[in-house]
């Protein structure tokens, strides 16, 4: 049994891909979107969609605790969440360690979010998540390698002096081919073992997604994948999670409370940016945003991981009752 509903004709994915295609066509055939406009688009989408989707974590954690027959405490949730934020922020005293951990967390989180919709059982799920996450980040990063140093000049001296950078720059095409091949072979293997449901629609979907994020400029590619694709599909998965427990009304009733957490998150971002400007005056806005997102990733990943683990439990708690968007056998 997979954890997510397959949307009819993949309505949400199809709509998002149309947006990506439209932006791609506009940039290359109508008017080249200036870098300042790209930055504005990134910030607006991250603050309006990216950060608020993480603000639903307290609702998800409450549902996780309910399924585990545990009493939910908002004080415990907030204190644990803030502790994880603080603990990971200390890793940025050692930037390469922090950045490496952020990449590893992102690999798993992106894989778990995007691949849950095609899973039929948990067998080799972790391997699939990692392979997909590596594949997506390879496309996102290696297809924009030269743009990264230009867009975040504060890290250019460190990157340019890194032997890893020269290796990636020299072998970017080969690495992309290898990771793509491994992903394709993994999909074929999982399909043959009946672990996933993967058809022509998913094939087209992932092909178009890869083309969009590889051909768009760095900031627009990140805006599309993180703020639109990942965040919106995560929210959809959360809604399905609550529907699977007949808690859709509860989700709608409490969703407004996430506004408070969104404001707290935005306030934290502003405070962290101010602190970075004080202690690291050379830090530009994009690098500060990278640090903030990395710090938010660990506690968010933990909550969402528990949610995906609980999908079977959530469905079974209905004792076979019909709900819209129930997982498919």
Image (cartoon, rainbow, N blue to C red):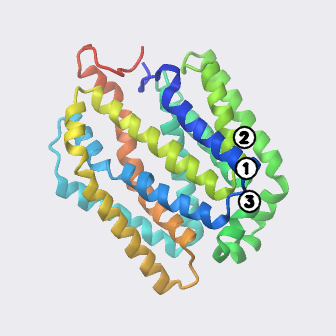
State the residue in front, 26 or 301.
26
Please say if 196 is above or below 136: above
Q: Residues within 10 Å of mark 1 (few under 14, many from 20)?
A: few
In the visual, does 12 lie left or right of 29?
left
Q: Residues within 10 Å of mark 2 (few under 14, many from 20)?
A: some
Q: Earlier in the sequence, mark 1 or mark 2?
A: 1
Name the secondary structure under disc 3. helix
Q: Earlier in the sequence, mark 3 or mark 2?
A: 3
Could you say which quadrant of the image residue 153 lies in? bottom right
Please say if 31 is above or below 6: below
Name the secondary structure under disc 1. helix
Q: Residue at x 71, y 40 (%)?
A: 211
Q: Residues within 10 Å of mark 3 (few under 14, many from 20)?
A: some
Does the CB distance between marks 3 and 1 fall below 8 Å? no
Q: In the rendering, which numbered label is found on residue 179?
A: 2
Q: Earlier in the sequence, mark 3 or mark 1?
A: 1
Q: In the rendering, which numbered label is found on residue 30?
A: 1
């Amino acid at each position: 049994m997979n954890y997510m509903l397959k949307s009819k004709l993949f309505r949400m994915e199809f709509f998002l891909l149309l947006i990506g295609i439209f932006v791609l066509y506009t940039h290359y055939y109508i008017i080249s979107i200036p870098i300042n406009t790209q930055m504005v688009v990134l910030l607006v989408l991250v603050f309006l969609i990216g950060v608020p989707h993480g603000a639903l974590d307290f609702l998800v954690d409450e549902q996780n605790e309910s399924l585990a027959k545990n009493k939910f405490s908002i004080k415990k949730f907030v204190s644990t969440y803030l502790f994880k934020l603080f603990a990971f922020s200390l890793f940025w005293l050692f930037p390469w360690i922090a950045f490496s951990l952020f990449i590893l967390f992102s690999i798993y989180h992106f894989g778990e979010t995007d691949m849950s919709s095609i899973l039929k059982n948990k067998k080799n799920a972790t391997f699939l998540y990692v392979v997909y996450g590596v594949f997506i980040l390879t496309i996102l990063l290696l297809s924009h390698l030269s743009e990264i140093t230009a867009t975040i000049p504060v890290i250019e001296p460190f990157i340019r002096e890194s032997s890893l950078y020269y290796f990636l720059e020299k072998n970017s095409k080969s690495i992309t081919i290898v990771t793509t091949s491994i992903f394709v072979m993994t999909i074929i293997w999982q399909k043959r073992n009946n672990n996933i449901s993967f058809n022509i629609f998913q094939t087209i979907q992932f092909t178009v997604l890869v083309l969009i994020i590889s051909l768009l400029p760095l900031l627009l590619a990140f805006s599309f994948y993180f703020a639109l694709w990942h965040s919106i599909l995560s929210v959809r998965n959360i809604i399905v999670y609550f529907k699977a427990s007949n808690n859709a009304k509860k989700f709608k009733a409490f969703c407004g409370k996430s506004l408070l957490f969104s404001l707290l998150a935005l306030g934290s971002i502003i405070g962290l940016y101010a602190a970075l400007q004080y202690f690291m005056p050379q830090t530009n806005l994009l690098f500060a945003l990278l640090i903030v997102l990395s710090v938010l990733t660990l506690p968010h990943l933990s909550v969402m991981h528990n949610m995906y683990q609980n999908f079977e439990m959530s469905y079974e708690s209905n004792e076979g009752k019909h709900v819209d968007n129930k997982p498919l056998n």
